[in-house]
Image (cartoon, helix red, strand yellow):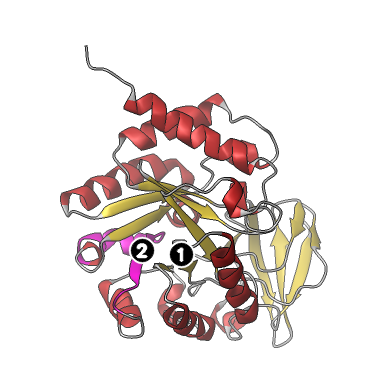
Amino acid sequence: MQNFILTVGPSLGSKINLQELHQDNFIYRINGAHGSLDDIKNTVTKLRKQVKNVEILIDLPGNKIRTSNIKEPIKLQKNEDFSIGIENFNFKDFYKLLKPGMQVYANDSTFLFIVKEINDKEIVFNSKSSGYLLNNKGMHIRNLHKDIPFLFEKDKELIKLCNDFEVSFVGASFVRKKEDIKEIKSLLNKDIKIISKIETVDAVNNLYEILKEVKYILIDRGDLSTEIGIEKIPRFQKHIIQMAHHNGVNVFLATQILKNMEEKPIPTIAEIDDLYHIAKSGVFGIQLSEESAIGSYVKECIDILNLIQKEINSEKII
C-alpha cells in the first residue's frame, strides 16, 4: 500500500492544515457532490496555499440520485410513512422512474425505504429504518440507471473546473461501461489521470473493457454493496483486484477503512485485520472518506496507516 487518498472537509484542510501532517504519498480528495462550484474552486486554492504542488483528486458526483435542498433533517420512524417533494432530488425526473413497491437504499444502505405512492408533487415512502435523513444523501434503486444520463450537468461543470485548475486526478463515479470513460476523456485534458470507480454491477460485468481504458480504479465498497449485497463484497473485492493486477491497473480501495476512528482515537481489531489484508493484497492505495473529512482523529488515522505499512515492510520470510 503506497498511496493514501485523504478526503478534505471540515476537519482536514480546515481545522487541520495540510502542513501539519503532509506526506509525499498523499492525494487530497475533494468530493464534488458536496458544495457549489465556487466552494470547490476555493478549496483547491486553499489546499495549494497550504502545500505546494499538492496532488488533488476531484470526485465527480456522477449520476447518483441524491436528496437536495432539504433544509431540516427528515425524522424517520420504522414502519411509518414520510414524504419528500419531487423538487428535493438532484435529478428532476426521478419521480417518473418510480413505481409503488420499489426498494430504495439510502445513505450508503443504512436506510431502507419502500416506495408507497408517487404524484406530481411528492413521493411517499414507508421507512424500514429509524433515524434522520439528511440533505445530499444517496437514494439508490437497483437497475434504475439505464434510464438516467451518465453525466449530470454538475459533472460537466466540474470537468471544466478540473481542466482550468489542472488537478492531478478525476474520479469517475458510477461507471458502467467503457463508453462512460470515453465520454469523460472527450471532455478532460489528457494530462489529468482518471480513476474509474467500480461501484456498480455493470462495472464489474464490464470490468475487462473498463480496465483497458484506465490506469487506475477505485473499489467503492459502500455503493457496490447496495447493488450486490454486503455479504458479497469480500468475493467481489478479491475478483476485481485480481483482474486489475492481471491487466496492469492500479487499485485503490475505499469505504469504512477506519470507520471507528471517526469518533474514537483507536481502530477496532477487525479494522486493523482488514487493513492488513488489504495492504497484503497488493493494492496501490486506500481512501479515507469521513475519517479525514469530518473525523475527530485524522492524525491518529494516518498514524495507523503508516504503522500497518511499517509492519508489513518489516516482515521477514523465515
Image coordinates of residue 310 in percent, x first then y, are 40, 28
Quadrant of the image occupied by residue 70? bottom right
Residue drawn 19% across the image and 65% down it: 212
Residue drawn 44% across the image and 74% down it: 145
Indicate whether 311 appears above or below 190.
above
**Residue 204 marker:** none
Location of the C terminus (image quadrant):
top left
Identify the secondary structure beneath mark 2.
strand
Location of the N terminus (image quadrant):
top left
- Disc 2 to disc 1, C-alpha distance: 9 Å
The amino acid on which the numbered mark 1 sits, given as a three-letter code, is: Leu
Q: Residues within 10 Å of mark 1 (few under 14, many from 20)?
A: many
Q: Which residues are magenta?
A: 190-209
Residue drawn 50% across the image and 85% down it: 157
- What residue is shown with label 1? 57
> 28 and 273: which one is in front?
28
**Residue 195 marker:** 2
Which of marks 1 and 2 precedes in the sequence? 1
Residue 283 lies left or right of residue 119; in this view the side is: left
> 159 and 91: which one is in front?
159
Quadrant of the image occupied by residue 168? bottom left
Image coordinates of residue 312 in percent, x first then y, are 35, 27
The amino acid on which the numbered mark 2 sits, given as a three-letter code, is: Ile
Q: Are marks 2 and 1 in contact (CB under 8 Å)?
A: yes
> 237 and 162: which one is in front?
162
